[in-house]
Amino acid sequence: MRTWSCAILALPLAAASLTVTKPEDVGLSSERLQRINQMIQRRIDAGEMAGAVTLLARRGRVAHFEAQGVADLESKKPMAKDSLFRIASMSKPITGVATMMLVEEGKVRLTDPVSRYIPEFRGIKVAVAQPNAGPELKFYTVPAEREITVRDLLAHTSGLASGPMGNSELAKFARKPNETLADYIPRLAATPLEFQPGSRYLYSPGAAFDTLGRIVEIVSGMNFDQFLKQRLFGPLEMKDIFFYTPAEKKAREATIYQLRDHKLSKPEARPAMGETYFSGAGGLIGVSGPVGLGSFANVSTDAASNRQIANRILIRTSTVG
């Protein structure tokens, strides 16, 4: 089963703003770029996606920006270049930048234990699978050999909600309606880690980057959504990105579909949870164009650029290089 709400980007990290140009002006071929449209159209014709917005930029300029298919299968509303998409885990790079901004400012260190900011993470346990347990999931817990750090959260080496043992405990601490990061994240510390911190890599779909969002809140004194708005989205002039779509922009949302048994269908509706939880792991909604994700992906870290972009530099190259 796959979930489709598609905005595809191919962007170099080279410039703070994007302008549209002919492909040949940046060393690309108009004819060859048509292969992008052809590939997307094949997927649409095969019933694998409803529609898509694709953008490709080179040397800080947009060479390809197209909308194809429909944003909603029932109404046949055409996909538009300013359609809004739930960007899911593309929220994580944005949360990573927010965290690294605070690292660069000396307010957070990568080696800091998470418990420095959220005391509940002190003394966390690690799950160990019981040998010869057969197909049934059985484990016991042991003390963590060291605390999980900010670096572990960023690098998916924390073990926090990263696999079947830790995830099996998540239901006991499920998020409740209208809870905030401050309400929910401390409870995650009661779940066992999947492995000893730093001992391996295993993707943490939600917990690690939601925890980073909470750390940003604690250090900055701002709700995570406000920090992103003031420190990232505002300087980048990203006006169409948010955790919850404003009522006046709802009509621009692309419908999310699941590909199940070779057929697109809407996922089951989730219970209403309010609009108070700002997930750094997968909560953002936005557009894909030059004023949306494209603007973020192209943020310049080059102070020597001949463009007047100093007010848009978020982090130095050395911080992420």
Image (spheres, helix red, strand yellow):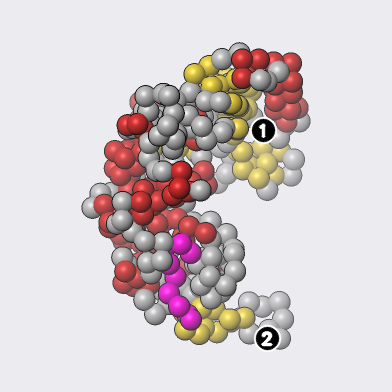
What is the residue that sits farthest to the front in this orientation?
304
Residue type (three-letter) at the residue carrying disc 1: Met
Decide if residue 176 is on the left or right side of residue 21. left
Q: Amino acid at mark 2?
A: Pro
Among the 4 quarters of the image, the one containing residue 66: top right
Q: Main secondary structure of the magenta part?
A: loop
- Is residue 267 placed above or below 167 in the rendered structure? above
Residue segment shown in magenta: 144-152
Q: Quadrant of residue 241?
A: top left
x then y, percent, for residue 40: 70, 27
Q: Residue at x 62, y 81 (%)?
A: 129
Residue located 74% across and 40% down the image: 262
Q: Toward the viewer: 78 or 302?
A: 302
Q: Could you tell me how far apart the alpha carbons at marks 1 and 2 are, in whole angstroms?
A: 43 Å
Q: Secondary structure at mark 2?
A: loop
Residue at the left extreme?
221
- Side (left or right) of 173 relative to 31: left
Q: Counting other residues with Cα less than 10 Å from the Cα at mark 2, is it few (<14), some (14-19), or many (20 or more)? A: few
Neighbor class of circle 1 (other Cα within 10 Å; few <14, some 14-19, many 20+) is many
The front one of 109 and 207 is 109
In the displayed structure, would residue 108 be above or below residue 141?
above
Q: Which residue is mark 2?
A: 131
Residue 321 belongs to magenta span: no
Q: Which residue is mark 1?
A: 49
Image position, residue 32 (x, y; %): 74, 20
Q: Residue at x 59, y 63 (%)?
A: 202
First along the sequence among labels 1 and 2? 1
| Residue 224 image position (x, y, % from top left) | 32, 48
Q: Nearer the viewer, residue 54 or 165?
A: 54
Element at label 1: loop
Nearer the viewer's eye, disc 1 or disc 2? 2
Count of numbered marks? 2
